[in-house]
Amino acid sequence: MFEHGSIGPVAARRLAFDTPIALAAGVSLPRWELAYETYGELNAARSNAVLVCHALSGHHHVAGWYADDPRNIGWWDNLIGPGRPLDTNRFFVVGVNNLGGCHGSTGPSSPNPATGQPWGADFPVVTVSDWVAAQARLADALGIDQWAAVIGGSLGGMQALQWTIDLPERVRHALVIAAAPKLTAENIAFNDVARQAILTDPDFHGGHFYRHGTRPTRGLRLARMLGHITYLSDDQMAEKFGRKRRADAGRFGYGVEFEIESYLRYQGDKFAGHFDANTYLLMTKALDYFDPAEPCGGDLAAALAGARAKYFVASFTTDWRFSPARSREIVHALVKNKHDVSYAEIVSPHGHDAFLMDDRHYHALVAGYLRNVKT
């Protein structure tokens, strides 16, 4: 159905902002930077721009690859490119690494201008609304007054939803995929256990591990292993791993014996090798704090009353981290306001990670919706 050629080689950019940004935590960043990438061409009317918001461990490298590292392929490359669901022949696509990130945007590993040392634990906590405000500054710099669409999965979908609340006049369509209107107590608990694994790592040093020449890789590894379990479905793990044992595994010990153990350790080691522990803490806290209905006494419909966007909301049947019921809460609040909303509940075995997969039915739904987005 879709062409399988990627957008090709791309280049990351950085933009520095000298005007302070006030954060929900009550502090301001005096000078800050955002790393971003763009794909496609901005039309003369500047009306075809689409913002892609990333999830917890994501970044600005959304599509294509780097000429000096062809294996470094964008995390949503299967969705974005010429002829793909988010078609770069029609749209000017912008991917951004959020404030607090560790892939080029100002974050805990960046120098604190007051000390010249990495911010570390002194970097302020950020919220989804803070990210929207920062992304709006980037849009201003790019000459984009209004997004044709804002799209994201998981925490990225929450950002898309927040855009329609905080700056309703600046977004025409929001694609909210595998998201929720707020975290359940269970999800907050998962995040806290993950954070405790990092905070109690002896190499964490209260968040100032940079100056000690260490990294809390053990804690970050455990945090990722726990998180990865929640991103998969039980059926998927059973089909892929079952109770299979490694050929070289021993017996009656605590080594890596089952294939699922080997897989989780691999994922944990891979993640801990490149991600910043303080950024992980910030991202999970942003998830915990996300609750756009809270200022309206918990009434999500009231929070969305001023929105002007049209919506595409999608969930996946085996996603137990952000179940379809949570997406339907968003849909019901939109319907209560008589907003234009399309909803898809997609059969998939891939759990929460389904929004990242190259699924023909899922991609056809996204493509069908985006074909009706005027540019």
Image: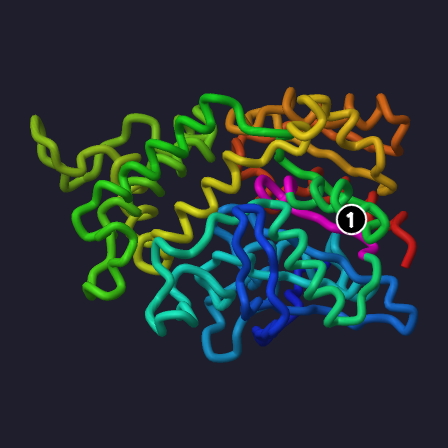
* Residue 154 is a magenta residue: yes
Mark 1: secondary structure: loop
Q: Quadrant of residue 237?
A: top left
Q: Residue 278, position in %: x, y?
A: 37, 52
> Could you say which is closer to the camera, residue 6 or residue 324?
324
Residue at image location 31% in from the left, 53% down from the top: 272
Please state which of residues 179 and 235 is positioned toward the viewer in this rendering. Answer: 179
On screen, 325 above or below 45?
Answer: above
- Residue 294: give x, y in percent of width and height: 64, 28
Q: Is residue 316 above or below residue 129?
A: above
The type of colouring in the image is rainbow
Of 150 and 23, the residue lying toward us: 23
Find residue 102 and report its horizontal and vertical position in percent.
44, 61
The answer to whether any part of residue 9 appears in the image is no
- Local crowd size for mark 1, using a 10 Å CA cut-off: few (<14), some (14–19), many (≥20): some
Q: Is residue 55 left or right of residue 337?
A: left
Q: Which residue, as the protein is rendered here, is positioned at the far bottom?
A: 68
Placement of the C terminus among the 4 image quadrants: bottom right
In percent of width and height, residue 310 lies at 85, 40
Count of numbered circles on the image: 1
> Which residue appears at 55% of the width and 25% of the height?
318
Determine whether 259 is above or below 139 in the image.
above
Horizontal side of residue 73 vs 3, given as left or right: left
In the displayed structure, would residue 72 be above or below residue 246? below
- The residue carrying mark 1 is 167
Residue at x 64% of width, y 46% of height: 129
Residue that appears at 88% across and 31% down? 339
Query: Where does the magenta region start and end?
Result: 147-158
The answer to whether residue 113 is visible is: yes
Mark 1: amino acid: Leu
